[in-house]
């Protein structure tokens, strides 16, 4: 029979659902924001620039504003997703520490409780999600820097 301390450390269904949403934000939404930003920016730049002769200015008025707007919104979404994914990791990290503290009185050669194994697996997934979310924030920053330092309708060579 389980003691009340281990029952308290067990993840509830609502916590599991919330943690999967947090992980999904880091795994899918943050990279998706980067992908959409690249696709929309490249499409806008390709449609507004003549491919045969470099133009002094784009064919679409206020194209730079559109590019910066798309980039800023993608960056905000990606930062929010990375923050949420990191929050999920921190929640699991604290729960993992509480479980280890409550089971530290047991002998070290005993198998860890099932709750600790479950939290450890989910903590690894949350860490991967947070790292991926932060990586794509960095990717968006570098993509925005390319927009800042390169002219919209200039040739790349």
Image: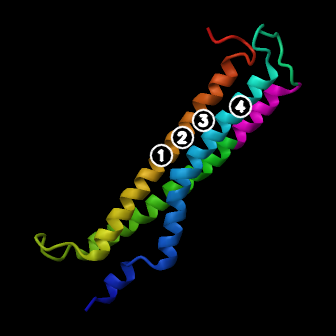
Q: Which residue is mark 4?
A: 41
Give the Cα distance between marks 4 and 2. Answer: 16 Å
Quadrant in the picture for the C terminus: top right
Between discs 3 and 1, the one toward the N terminus = 1
Local secondary structure at mark 2 = helix
Residue 114, horizontal then vertical, whole percent: 27, 76
Does 109 sit left or right of 28 as displayed?
Answer: left
Which disc number belongs to residue 136? 2
**What mark, if any, has residue 140 been given in the picture?**
3
Which structural element holds mark 4? helix
Quadrant for residue 142, please give it. Answer: top right
CB-based contact (under 8 Å), mark 4 and mark 2: no
Instruction: Tell me where residue 111 appears, x and y as whole percent.
Output: 17, 73
Q: Residue at x 28, y 88 (%)?
A: 2
Residue segment shown in magenta: 61-73
Which mark is first along the chain, 1 or 4?
4
Residue contact between numbered discs 1 and 2, judged by CB atoms under 8 Å: yes
Which residue lies most toward the front here?
52
- Magenta stretch: includes residue 63: yes
- Left or right of residue 70: residue 110: left
Residue on which disc 1 sits: 132
């Amino acid at each position: 029979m389980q003691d009340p301390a281990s029952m308290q450390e067990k993840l509830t269904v609502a916590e599991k659902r919330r943690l999967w949403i947090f992980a999904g934000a880091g795994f899918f939404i943050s990279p998706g924001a980067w992908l959409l930003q690249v696709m929309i920016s490249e499409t806008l730049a390709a449609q507004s620039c003549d491919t045969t002769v470099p133009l002094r200015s784009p064919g679409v008025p206020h194209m730079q504003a559109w590019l910066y707007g798309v980039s800023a919104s993608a960056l905000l979404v990606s930062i929010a997703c990375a923050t949420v994914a990191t929050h999920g990791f921190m929640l699991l990290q604290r729960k993992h520490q509480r479980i280890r503290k409550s089971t530290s009185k047991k002998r070290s050669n005993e198998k860890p409780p099932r709750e600790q194994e479950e939290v450890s697996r989910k903590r690894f997934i949350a860490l991967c999600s947070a790292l991926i979310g932060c990586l794509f924030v960095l990717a968006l920053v570098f993509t925005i820097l390319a927009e800042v330092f390169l002219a919209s309708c200039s040739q790349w060579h």
